[in-house]
Amino acid sequence: MKHAAARAWCLVHWLTTRLDESLQDARRQPDRGDISITTVIIWVAAVTGALLIAGTIAVVITKYNGKLSGL
């Protein structure tokens, strides 16, 4: 049990150290070229559109599966 506690403490220490380093870096360099909100909106719209198209195709194939099998 002591070994698990020691490993957990090391993990927590590493995470807090890494978070602190990241925050200090963000303070030194406020504009790090992060993804803009516009890019996120475009990606979400593209993925949503692709899923809607794939879902529509799946529904049409399921609906007309018996009729298409004779072609």
Image: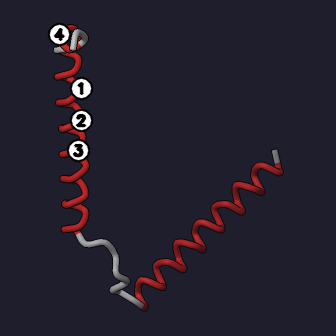
Whole-percent x, y for residue 20 in the image? 53, 77
Q: Which residue carries the number 1 mark?
A: 58
Q: Quadrant of the C terminus?
A: top left
Q: Pointer 4: residues within 10 angstroms few (<14), some, or many (20+)?
A: few
Which label's residue is closer to the chain start, 4 or 3? 3
Whole-percent x, y for residue 70 in the image? 22, 9
Marks 3 and 2, how far apart in space?
Answer: 6 Å
Which label's residue is closer to the chain start, 4 or 2? 2
Marks 1 and 4, how far apart in space?
Answer: 15 Å
Choose mark 4 or mark 2, whichever is in front.
4
Amino acid type, residue under disc 4 in the picture: Lys
Q: Residue at x 58, y 69 (%)?
A: 16
Going by the image, does 56 lie left or right of 5? left
Q: Which element is circle 1 on?
A: helix
Q: Which mark is residue 54?
A: 2
Above-or-below relation of 1 to 59 = below
Whole-percent x, y for residue 30 in the image? 35, 86
Q: Residue at x 23, y 44 (%)?
A: 50
Q: Nearer the viewer, residue 46 or 40?
A: 46
Above-or-below relation of 2 to 14 = above
Q: Which element is circle 3 on?
A: helix
Residue 27 sits in quarter: bottom left
Marks 2 and 1, how far apart in space?
Answer: 6 Å
Instruction: Mark 3 and mark 2 in contact? Answer it, CB < 8 Å.
Output: yes
Amino acid type, residue under disc 1 in the picture: Ala
Q: Which element is circle 2 on?
A: helix
Q: Nearer the viewer, residue 33 or 54?
A: 54
Marks 4 and 2, how far apart in space?
Answer: 20 Å
Q: Which residue carries the number 4 mark?
A: 67
Q: Which mark is residue 7?
A: none
Q: Residue at x 18, y 38 (%)?
A: 52
Q: Nearer the viewer, residue 44 or 61?
A: 61
